Image (cartoon, rainbow, N blue to C red):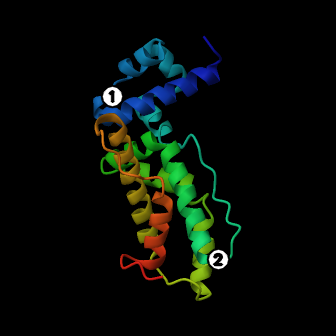
Amino acid sequence: MGSQSDTKKKIIREARKLFAERGYNGATTAEIARRVEVSEAALYKHFKGKKDIFLACITPSVFEPPKMNSDHNLDLVRDVIKARVEVIRSNLDSFNILFRESPNHPELAKMFMEQIYIQDKSMEQLLQKVSNGNLTPVQSLLYELGITSAIWSLLNFEKLQEEIISEKLPLDHMEDEIADVVLYGLLGKR
């Protein structure tokens, strides 16, 4: 088998899939060990228990803060949305766990805020635009949760389409459409 580090990464990867499929209560350390092809005791060389494995699964495997090079409002918002779509798409199982399990494990939301939103300085740039009068004020929590929830829902719908729906909805312009809603509202004022 590979190194200790490789084994730990594999445990997290397989556990993340299992927790996303079955939830915390439906997943067992025995099933995680089976999927990783190690003994259950081997899991405890890397983690104190199921809860530690679970919390490690929330840590995003991919996070790249958005590159915000534009002074134009539309481009700035689109950059933020595109980066958020990529973070959620790359970490969809982690987001599924977060949304499913947060009511039962409040520490998940706190961890998530620390790992994603605090590292993501794009909101500061948008708020600076608001304070300068260049963008209309919106409550940042509403923005963050609303945009994240919308993207998460669309990406899960996209995944559902791939699995069981033969007729696909075009989601290739999702980032632009969400940016338009953020900037212009539901009436689409431009």
Residue at the extreme right: 69
* Residue 107 visible, this orientation: no
Q: On the image, which quarter does residue 80 sit in?
A: bottom right
The residue carrying mark 2 is 72
Residue drawn 36% across the image and 53% down it? 153
Residue drawn 43% across the image and 63% down it? 147
Task: Indicate the position of residue 21 as horizontal and vertical percent values.
Answer: 33, 33
Q: Neighbour class for label 1 at 10 Å: few (<14), some, many (≥20)?
A: some
Q: What residue type is labelled 1?
A: Ala
**Is 158 rendered above or below residue 130?**
above
Left or right: where does residue 135 sit relative to residue 155?
Answer: right
Residue at the extreme bottom: 133
Left or right: where does residue 88 sit relative to residue 103?
Answer: right
In-front residue for pair 163/28 = 163
Left or right: where does residue 174 sit relative to residue 61?
Answer: left
Residue drawn 61% across the image and 70% down it? 75
Question: Marks 2 and 1, Cα distance to the nearest angstrom?
Answer: 47 Å
